[in-house]
Image (cartoon, grey):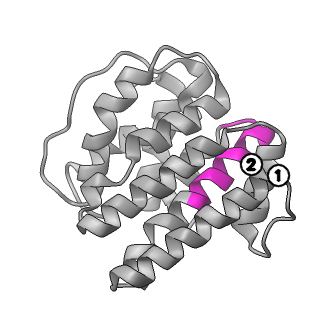
Amino acid sequence: MRKGDEDRWISSRYAAKPERRALIALYAFAYELARVRIVVTEPGLGAIRFQWWRDALEEIETGKPPRAHNVVGALADMLAENRYRIDALQRLVDQYEDAFDASDRALQPESHLTATAARVLADAHGWGQHISTIAPHFAALRRGERVGYGPVVPKVPKAIRPAVAHFRLRQLYGKAPDPSSVSKRLCVLRGVMSGKV
């Protein structure tokens, strides 16, 4: 995860250890889904990969032993601990597949992924609408699109900061497409400490 999605990995470091494990399993799952567009180019092969993930989730849900895959095993553990709901994970598969089919990364479920992560930390936090508003701007800037910084939002509730502090990286991505790891860490730390993203 550290190499695959450094932004979320940095943010997750500020969660307590049990929640951190749940965030990393979720983010690793999202990374596996997002990289389908990199490892395959044919729609049929993409459909096979997404179906593999659906089948893996269905097997977990029905109580079958998890497949021999690190991410599947981690998801099974976190689902057993009720860290997230299976339908939220299935919806991620559907949304990543829709983005793949349309060849449009803008359709990837940044809002849903972040909302699921926030629920790992707090069931009720009152920041759902802000996540939906800010997530597309963060994702677009991270992709290198010039869309502007996005909306100014109120401070993030302390309980969910490790799930959304990486949104503060909009400040860096708005200036340069590839900020340094040190800059990212300092930026996310400020987001965690201040709640300003």
In this rendering, the answer to whether 104 lies above or below 183 is below
- The residue that disc 1 covers is 77
The three-letter amino acid code for the residue at tag 2 is: Arg
Q: Is residue 16 magenta?
A: yes
Element carrying mark 1: helix
Give the image location of residue 145, x and y in percent: 16, 56
Residue 179 in view, yes or no: no
Residue 112 in view, yes or no: yes
- The residue that disc 2 covers is 21
Q: Main secondary structure of the magenta part?
A: helix
Give the image location of residue 7, x and y in percent: 47, 53
The boundaries of the magenta stretch are 15-29
Disc 1 from disc 2: Cα separation = 10 Å
Q: Quadrant of the N terminus?
A: bottom right
Give the image location of residue 143, x and y in percent: 26, 60
Relative to the observer, which residue lies in front, 98 or 13? 98
Q: Are marks 1 and 2 in contact (CB under 8 Å)?
A: yes
Q: Is residue 88 magenta?
A: no
- Few, some or many residues within 10 Å of mark 1 (<14, 14–19, 20+): some
Q: Earlier in the sequence, mark 1 or mark 2?
A: 2
Relative to the observer, which residue lies in front, 187 or 143? 143
Give the image location of residue 41, x and y in percent: 33, 85
